[in-house]
Amino acid sequence: MVAFGKKLKETQIQEWQGYYINYKLMKKKVKNYVQQIEVSEQSREYVLKDFSRILDKQIEKIVLFLLEQQGELASRLFVLGQEHDILVQQQDGSKLCELQQSYRDVGRELLQLLFFVEMNAIGVRKILKKFDKRCGYKFTNYYVKTRANHPYSQLRQIFKHVGVSAVVGTLSRNLADLQDNKGNYTSIYDHPGLPFQDPIIGSIHQAVDRLTNSTDFLHYLGKHALILPEELPTPSEDHAADERYHLMSLLLNLVNAFLYMVNTYIIVPTADDYSLSLGAAATLCGAVIGSMAVAQVFSSVYFSAWSNKSYMKPLLFSSIVLLVGNTLYALAYDFNSIYILLIGRLFCGLGSARAVNRRYITDCVPLHLRMKASAGFVSASALGMACGPAVACLLQTNFKFLKITFNQDTLPGWIMAFAWFLYLLCLWTTFREPPKEEIEDVLLPKANSGQIENGLVQKDITQPLLLSAEEKGQEEDEDQDCDNSEDSAEEIQKPVTSIVSAYKLLTPSVKVQLLIYFMLKYAMEILLAESSVVTTYYFIWSTSNVAIFLACLGLTVLPVNILVGSYLSNIFEERQVLLASEILVCLGIVLSFHIVIPYSVPQYVGSALITFVAAEVLEGVNLNLLSRVMSSRLSKGTYNGGLLSTEAGTLARVFADSTITLAGYWGMSRLLNVTLLPSLFICIFSIIATCFTYNSMY
């Protein structure tokens, strides 16, 4: 596989096959146990002990091979260290480059070794799951409980990573010493905050994190962007990414994401008042807010396609369209036209360049900075969501200038038009378009490059764990996890060319996770979009009160993600957090209903807080899972994973805003309950679907 620097030759791959867990043997043993139980009713204790003994031997084989390979890597590092000392004295630049590459080769082989462990860990998980299902015993609980904390457990040895940490430390120190092949060497011990980190080291850390199920806030938040992982780049690809990278262009890309989210939510507190002032019903605010989402359904596709050829041109077009859209939105008041208002918001939706924002990070940011850039994209969006209502709170004024009205309804449009005008100037003068041929090179799949499908090594390395086509046909339902790895190598490397092709790559668990994403976005949009109407009707809140309430909700996004990313995801399985947060969203929706007793502020605020915070937790965990299990073919091209998630969320907003507008026909007294009913049904349906696919999630 070229992506790992031609790391393993064919003979070495064949040599490693004997050290994988013997999946076929273990399946055969399980089948024999089932037959024995049916015929002679073998005792539970005998079956557990016999299968435990066999599995112990398999894991011991893996651990001893792992230690042997770590010893070989340590020997190679010792020899390289001696060469390092000699070359430092000679100051031979070309040989220092070769030495640096030799260290990277060792890192790639260590990464391969970690993938070997990961594949075997998955094999163990699958065989435990099969045993529980076929024999009717809770063998997994028994085996893990008795082996997890025993001092001599071979299962523990796989996850301790003592040898791995030592190798990574040696690699990090020497690669830092050889940075830029200069004579001024920097010690990682003297500068613990040194930003330099070779991409191979970052990949090793990610592989270790997958094995230990550990994560941190940066990686957790970064995965919200659903910028899917690709294969480890070769040195030439690293250099190309560095050439494309431009800090100011990246910052302008993030500013675009921030301003768009401000633009989306700045009108929410005043949309009902604006509709009333134009002679329409207050519930038309659903159509006003939702028209932007309707246009975004289409703009996401053509912007994603446009980003195949350019980044600057779609961003310029986006800014111009948003400037025009916000100007029309503001002028609708003086023209007294609800149609101009809706057209203005449609223009704003047509300017949604979030697909370009994601694509720029994927294609033009080096691998070692990509997770930070992804986290920046998510943070900018979250801050924009909070800043939109907060800015609306400050626009409580009313005056005329040149016969143009400036009040709390029109000022959001004028403020955003001015902001997009300034952004357009900065974009025109500062943004640097990557050379066209480089963009095309990024989009073309490498002829022989390997891929990591769903976070795992592709077919050449995983073959020992996979069944033949005939065997898979016999037990297709039990080995669905492996089926995705059986695509031909040529097909795997091609980006999908249509939305239908992208849909075919989605497994049942991924479809359920997209349903969950639709559900949470629907619930959040109902809550946010009708907040001004509901609070005005029940509590007579002013625009300032609504804006402050929405801003406070928006400010919970980052703290909640810090809590989940740094703590909860390391204590509980993400599937458990996913199901628990779905149940909490359902509870928040139930508490929001107005039934019998008078509707109070504590009930509304409390239920809204539960719904919103639980939905934020759910969104983070759900997208984190999606980034792991979605096909890596969706990391490139027009129809990528980010586009699919964006479309699912946008459609949810469209349906939610349409629900609010239609519910207005039943009167204000029934608006709240009528709009909450679909949210409740969709939420219950998603919980049921999650329960059915719970075990198949990562």
Image: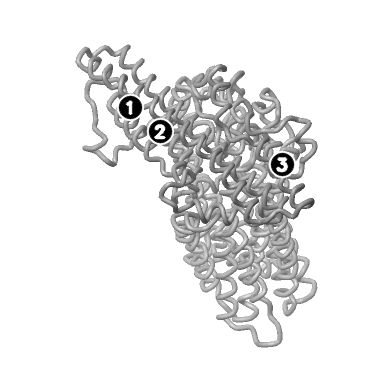
Residue behind mark 1: 175
Residue 320 in view of the camera? no
Circle 1: residue type? Leu
Earlier residue among tags 2 and 3: 2
Q: Position of residue 682 (x, y in %)?
A: 73, 62
Q: Secondary structure at mark 1?
A: helix
Residue 574 lies in quadrant: bottom right
| Residue at point 31%, 12% (across, down) | 95
Q: Label 1 to label 2, Cα distance in Å?
A: 10 Å
- Report the front residue among 338 and 162: 162
Q: Position of residue 316 (x, y in %)?
A: 56, 37
Residue 263 lies in quadrant: bottom right
**Is 324 placed above or below 79 here?**
below
Circle 3: residue type? Gln
- Report the front residue among 294 and 168: 168
Q: Position of residue 100 (x, y in %)?
A: 35, 21
Q: Is disc 1 in contact with disc 2, using a CB cutoff of under 8 Å?
A: yes
Q: Which mark is residue 201?
A: 2
Q: Position of residue 414 (x, y in %)?
A: 54, 55
In the displayed structure, does residue 136 sit left or right of residue 411? right
